[in-house]
Amino acid sequence: MFDRYRRNIDYIRISVTDRCNLRCRYCMPECGVEQVSHDQILRFDEMLRLVNVFACLGIKKIKLTGGEPLVRKGLPGMIAEIKKVKGIEQVTMTTNGILLEENLPVLVAAGLDGVNISLDTLSAEKYHEITRKEGIEKVLSSLDACSRYPELRVKINAVTLADYNQDEIENLALIARDRDIDVRFIEMMPMGLGKDFRGYDQNVIIEKLTAAFGQPVINEEKRGNGPAIYYKFDGFTGNVGFISAMSHTFCSDCNRVRLTSEGFLKPCLNFSEGVDLRRIMREGAGDEELKNIIEETIFNKPGQHCFGKESDREKDSRRMSAIGG
Ligand code: SAM
Ligand code: SF4
C-alpha cells in the first residue's frame, strides 16, 4: 500500500523478542533488558494473524529481528507458517550469528530466504569488548556453515564504531572478496545507547577501500529490500554496501514499517507514534478492523526521520533492541 507521500510500503521488520544473548554496548545495557512478562510479547498465532492482515495490505517481504531472534523458541516453525501466507514473497532474518549454525538446517528447511549476520569486528578481543560476551568463533563458524546452503542469501552487517573498527574496514570488506556475500557498513544512529558512540562516514570507508582494492563501481542492480548502496571492487565476488541513514538520508524511498515484539506497529524508527495492535487484537477486534487501523497508521507514516534535529514531535527513546534494529 502507499502512504500519504506515495511511498510503496511492502516490507515489515518484525521483532520476535526483545531479549538477546549478547550485550553490544551501543544496543543493550550490561544487565540486559527489563523483564517483560510472556503475555506482553505477541504469541506466534497473533503474529501470524497480523502477517495475514499485512499481506492483504501489500506487505511482501518480512525481516525477523529482535533482540536476538534465535533465542525465541519455535522460530523455524513460525517461519514455515509465514512462508505459507499468500502474498509473502520473502522471509529473512537478522541475527548476531551465535546460534545460527545449529539452527541453519531447520531454518533453511522452513524456507528462510536470507540471513543478515551482524559482525562489527574480526578480532576476538574487540568482539568481547563490544558485545561483552565470548563467541566470535561461533559467528565465524555460522558464516562458514552458510556456504552449505547456496539458496540462502547471506549479508554481513557491521556498524561503524570509530573507537573499535575503523582499522578493520579492509579486513571486514575482504569477506566479500572470495564469497558471494555482501558486506554492509551501517552508520551508527543516535538512538538509545548508540547516542554515546561515534561512527564514521561512508566516504572514509570508500577512501580506504579504494586505496586498498582500487576504484569501485556502483552496483545499480537491486540487491535487497532496503536503502543500501552497493559498490563492486575488482576481483570481489560479493559487494560492499553502505546504509547511511544519517549522512545520506533515504526517507523519501523508505518502504518499511516495524512491529515490536509487544505488538506495537511503528511506521518510523525515529518516532514513538504508532498503534498498539496487541491491545486491539486482545480486545476482540476483527480482521477488517485491524486492517483499517493498520492502513491508517501506515498511511500516516512520517515523511522523514529527525535524528540530529530538534523536533516538537515525540521522538522514540527506546533502545534499538526493543524496536528491532
Ligand atoms: N540481534 C540481532 C543482530 O544483532 O543482528 C538483531 C537485532 S539488532 C538490534 C539489528 C541490527 O541493529 C544489528 O546489526 C545492530 O548492529 C544494529 N544496531 C543496533 N543499534 C544500532 C544503532 N544505534 N545504530 C545503528 N545500528 C544499530
Ligand atoms: Fe543483541 Fe543485536 Fe543488540 Fe547486539 S545488536 S545486543 S546482538 S540485539
Image (cartoon, rainbow, N blue to C red):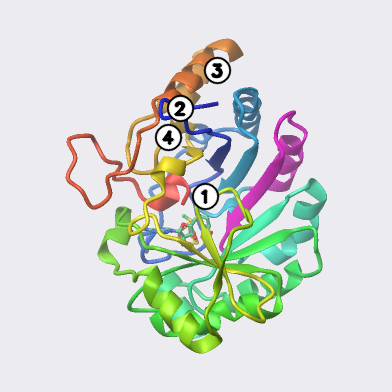
The residue drawn where x is 75% and y is 60% is 104
Q: Which residue is mark 4?
A: 266
Which of the two labelled residues, at mark 2 and mark 1, occupies the earlier sequence position?
Answer: 2
Residue 77, image x and y in percent?
Answer: 74, 42
Question: Local crowd at mark 3 within 10 Å, few (<14), some, or many (≥20)?
Answer: some
Q: CA distance from mark 4 to mark 1?
A: 14 Å
On whether ligand 1 comes within 8 Å of the CB at mark 2, the answer is no
Q: Mark 1 falls on what kind of element?
A: loop
Q: Is residue 293 above or below residue 93?
A: above
On whether ligand 1 comes within 8 Å of the CB at mark 1, the answer is yes
Q: Mark 3 falls on what kind of element?
A: helix
Q: Are marks 2 and 1 in contact (CB under 8 Å)?
A: no
Amino acid of disc 2: Asp
Residue 266, image x and y in percent?
Answer: 42, 34
Q: Quadrant of residue 240?
A: bottom right
Which of the two labelled residues, at mark 4 and mark 1, occupies the earlier sequence position?
Answer: 1
Amino acid of disc 4: Lys
- Of circles 4 and 2, the one toward us is 2
Q: Is residue 17 above or below residue 170?
A: above
Q: Is residue 18 magenta?
A: no
Q: Which residue is mark 2?
A: 3
Q: CA distance from mark 2 to mark 3?
A: 14 Å
Which of the two labelled residues, at mark 2 and mark 3, occupies the earlier sequence position?
Answer: 2
Amino acid of disc 1: Gly
Q: Which residue is mark 3?
A: 291
148 left or right, relative to 248: right
Q: Is residue 85 magenta?
A: yes
Q: Going by the picture, which residue comes out furthest to the bottom?
A: 212
Q: Which residue is mark 1?
A: 66
Q: Is residue 317 above or below residue 215?
A: above
